[in-house]
Image (cartoon, rainbow, N blue to C red):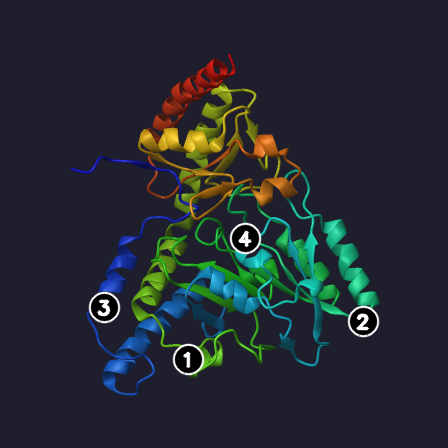
Amino acid sequence: MATARTYLDHNATTPMRSEARAAMLTALERCGAPSSIHGDGRAMRKLVETARHDVAALVGAPARNVVFCSSATEANNLALCLDWQRGRAAPLGRAAVSAVEHASVLSGGRIPADRLALLPVDARGMVDLAGASALLERWRAEGIAGLVSVMLANNETGVLQPVAALAERVHAAGGILHCDAAQAAGKIPLDIRDLGVDLITISSHKLGGPLGAGALVMASEALHLPNPLLRGGGQERGWRAGTENVPAIAGFGAAAAAAARDLTADAERCRALLAVLEEGVRAIAPEAVIFGEGAPRLPNTLCFAEPGIAAETALIALDLEGISVSSGSACSSGKVKVSHVLTAMGVPPDLAACALRVSLGRETLAEEVEFFVAVWTRLRKSLHDRKQHRAA
């Protein structure tokens, strides 16, 4: 019999909602390509369009402006292109992304490296609006319009970016703003009009849907991209070729509808539990550093470090206790590297190497938070003692 585990890594992925599972099963029981005109095809198309409506409603956009992709990473790569057109506006000549973006944005998509700039962040992890404004003014003085991409919520620290304020500056300079909201959707209220962004990315599995689905949502039909990432058939109105993954899309839509329905209650629960968690960590170790402290943050995310306890060692110890959390580092192929997010915030490498991320979800229980605090109380002492013994 499997041993129950305490799952506190919801920013990596979160358990599938029952509504999403039911929607996927309905789609899996049917046969038909959603582009076919016969009855079976139309039945599958209806599932896709229902999901499109529900995903659009989650971010306050028209359903016709939702483009389904295989992931948020693909949606980001679709967005990161200088070929975007909006009416008769000047073509885009430059791009900028924040220094704390997800790797799929930092890679620059299809933007040449010599046209891509990094926007710095302050010690809290928030984009420097003055620096961004200066860059936009330089572009405007050169007669250049730009594409800017800044996430709404950081996946490691939970820090929320001043996206609406940045949107005003980008649009004043004639540019286009893309926002990766994969970590924010389903956790905080999200409206593409209030944010003022032109393009927004969301992810299915971050809000209780299945893996393998994401979406790029446009604020206006005036936006046009003559060179989409995937070309072939006319699926997704020509934005993204390839037969749609109907079961995953159906699950995505059902999860989006459920997330919108439960958003306020889920956020309040997580916020209360996070306060208990943060208070517990501080009580155990007053010297612990909480990253993003003083900045607005997601209601479910705590990224902290206790100096002298390497995250890699702590993760293994916690895993052996049945607790799943992440480090505040980038993990690839089992290798842990110092977080580029914490580095951009000016965190010293030795402290960044100690960062742990605990992220809660709608299923998280108070008992699980208390269990983490109790286990961490014991483990940190053991890890400190072990380090001191080796030093001796």
Mark 1 or mark 3, which has the lower sequence index? Answer: 3
Q: From what the image shows, is residue 104 above or below residue 367?
A: below
As drawn, the residue found furthest toward the bottom would be 37
Q: Are marks 1 and 4 in contact (CB under 8 Å)?
A: no
- In the image, 233 versus 317, the foreground residue is 317
The image position of residue 253, as x and y in percent, is 36, 63
For marks 1 and 3, give the CA distance. Answer: 20 Å
Q: Are marks 1 and 3 in contact (CB under 8 Å)?
A: no
Dot 1 alpha-carbon crowd within 10 angstroms: few under 14, some 14 to 19, many 20 or more = some
Dot 3 alpha-carbon crowd within 10 angstroms: few under 14, some 14 to 19, many 20 or more = some
- Residue located beneath label 4 in the image: 102
Mark 4 or mark 3, which has the lower sequence index? Answer: 3
Give residue 118's quadrant in the image. Answer: bottom right
Identify the image quadrant of the N terminus: top left
| Type of the residue with mark 3 | Leu
- Residue located beneath label 3 in the image: 28
Which residue corresponds to the image point at 20% horizontal and 38% vertical from the top-left? 2
- In the image, 238 versus 164, the foreground residue is 238
